[in-house]
Image (cartoon, coloured by chain):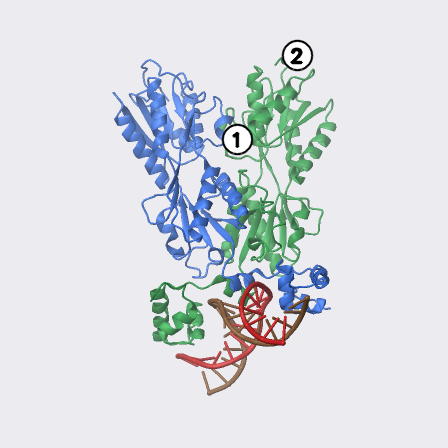
Chain colours: A green, B blue, C red, D brown
Amino acid sequence: MPAMSRPTSKDVAHEAGVSQSTVSLVLGGKWTGRVSPATARSVHEAAERLGYRPNQAARNLRLGTTRTVLLMVPTLTAPFFGPVYTGAVRVAARHGFGVVAYVWPDDAGPADSPFAAPREAIDGILASSMAVDALAEFRGTPAVMLDSDPSGTVPTVGFGVADGMRAIVAHLAGLGHHRIGHVAAAVDQWTFRARAHALATEVGALPGGALSRTTSAIEVTSAKAAATRLLTRPDPPTALVCDDDLIAAGAYKAARTLGLDVPSDVSVTGFDDVLLATALEPELTTVALPAEEMGAQGMQTLLELLDGRRPPRRVLPGVLKVRGSTAPSPPPRRAARR
Amino acid sequence: MPAMSRPTSKDVAHEAGVSQSTVSLVLGGKWTGRVSPATARSVHEAAERLGYRPNQAARNLRLGTTRTVLLMVPTLTAPFFGPVYTGAVRVAARHGFGVVAYVWPDDAGPADSPFAAPREAIDGILASSMAVDALAEFRGTPAVMLDSDPSGTVPTVGFGVADGMRAIVAHLAGLGHHRIGHVAAAVDQWTFRARAHALATEVGALPGGALSRTTSAIEVTSAKAAATRLLTRPDPPTALVCDDDLIAAGAYKAARTLGLDVPSDVSVTGFDDVLLATALEPELTTVALPAEEMGAQGMQTLLELLDGRRPPRRVLPGVLKVRGSTAPSPPPRRAARR
DNA sequence: CTGAAAGCGCTTACAG
DNA sequence: CTGAAAGCGCTTACAG
């Protein structure tokens, strides 16, 4: 045979001397009692010989389903999304679904063509940490939003972010802190707005509570600068509450550069509990967010949705991990000098 | 209209009072000069009204292409793969391709069904950090391997891993180190075998060079234990070469627990230069691997392959980043006590 | 136990 | 400028 294209089920049928239907039945595993074992074997052999693999596009078209779910995330560079994916895959696999990750928005832009391939050949969408309007162009596709604004009509799985902040403030207050600095993530996501709101509320309710606030990119250099701003104020905070573990790492650097010890001069807390949290010295007090569980429950929710059910809104509690970066508030001191 | 399924181009045609072909032409953007502007407008309006979105499966079947590439990675939890994805997307977007990430092997297992959906409805595969046989079940699909054994027949894009190790050893030797400990990653990947081999060769070529070696999972606790083993030997190394930045973080912890200062008592190096490297104190001397560039060049290579060309093998140099974790070798000392 | 036929929803020559 | 028809490669009733 000369250079030829990929074999189809027709080729297999011809090779095995049977009809296309028989090939489909056999290869689809639905042949017992309908096709003789001998025929089945010869079909398998023919398929093997030809290196046949079914065309998914045809299959999807015929079946009207892809058994594939798209996990839409704003970035794959944050350590948070790996576990989310892993959790989603775990439950998807049990139901014969595949999960594929997709970063949105991407550089391709929607202007290119209204036919953006990977976004459509799917049965459902799991969208993590996005604004609701991200789903606008997917209307009609069943979707579940993760770690996002729960006020919309789309089912969500969220974290108990406010409770997490509450736990941090309670912990800090118990150590005698009441001048708190918030190094907030300069990222326009619901979760960070919720964190800021909860923190402000909690510190406001604290006797003598004083909150200072600045924002930072989720990145060490920027976080160091931001923390430095807070720490060099006239009446500096004794504890820095950071929106993310990576920001906390920047706060450590700021403190050290200013000659302050973590935690005896200044306490630092993070959020997420990624690998970095225990790689740091001292290990970081932070709120662990069950990212993998979020992926799992998100997929669970999506599966229920695809099943025609009305899944409940789910909220996963964050867990405060007290480690070495928080300690009793030091006696009042002057502002550190740069 | 009662509860109905998703509209098709036929529905749009009917709504606009034109034929299916006209709808396809208009919505595909190939209408100028072939369809009157008025007709085109009414098609667009009808499509809008109905919330029409084309069925990708049908489109893919008809066109025989998906303009989608699968990025296969062993995990999404390692910080390395985010940039690889990002780089791949960057060049894919320029060519109208989408990129979708897929972790393999996954829990689904191949036993479930020979028809694994997401793996097939694609034009090509970018497989990162995998054994060659990972591609076995994808035979026929154009593929490029990243950071993998280059000895096979599949085109590859790799890192100059050996040169990176060479640079590390040269740097360390220049500081007077010759007793080197290798905290190797206990991961069966080509890149780590290449690192081990290069390091052994380089240290072997060093006057008085002595290499000790142990392995560790790519994870802080395991790395700490591994580094401790090396550091508590009778004639301990003065420098620890770690296969990964995260392992280096564990080495820091081991040193501190043993009362050793990094870098004055023991130098530590990493590999990769992920965010963590500069979050640590002292900042980590490591070899930066251009992960994003690998993704970009990998996609470039795949595009060439899809184009029927025979792309060259590409190698990207690692760059030694000298930071605070390496210093001149200390005078000989006794083994540290646990 | 096996085959012929229809049809999933597109796109693209081909006619007119 | 517009439409009717074929066909991409499957799967699934339906006949026999």
Q: Quadrant of the C terminus of chain B?
A: top left
Residue B320 % position (x, y): 41, 27
- Chain of the residue under the numbered disc 1 shown in the image: A
User: Callout 1: helix, strand or loop?
Assistant: helix
The answer, for residue A312, to whether it is visible in the render is: no
Q: Nearer the viewer, residue A30 or B136?
A: B136
C-alpha gap between disc 1 and disc 2: 29 Å
The answer, for residue A92, to whether it is visible in the render is: yes
Residue A243: image quadrant is top right
Q: Which mark is residue A334?
A: 2
Name the residue located 34 percent from the left edge and 71 percent from the top edge: A41
Residue A2 % position (x, y): 34, 65
Name the residue located 67 percent from the left edge and 26 percent from the top edge: A214
Q: Is residue B174 above or below residue A71?
A: above
Q: Which mark is residue B269?
A: none
Q: Is residue D12 above or below residue B90?
A: below
Name the residue located 69 percent from the left edge and 26 percent from the top edge: A213
Residue B212 % position (x, y): 30, 27
Residue type at the position of mark 1: Ala
Mark 1 closeness class: few <14, some 14–19, many ≥20 residues within 10 Å? many
Question: Which residue, given by chain and number where applicable, does mark 1 sit on?
Answer: A277
Q: Is residue A100 above or below residue A329?
A: below
Total tally of numbered discs in the picture: 2
Residue type at the position of mark 2: Arg
- Chain of the residue under the numbered disc 2 shown in the image: A
Residue B56 % position (x, y): 57, 60
Q: Quadrant of the N terminus of chain B?
A: bottom right
User: Callout 2: helix, strand or loop?
Assistant: loop
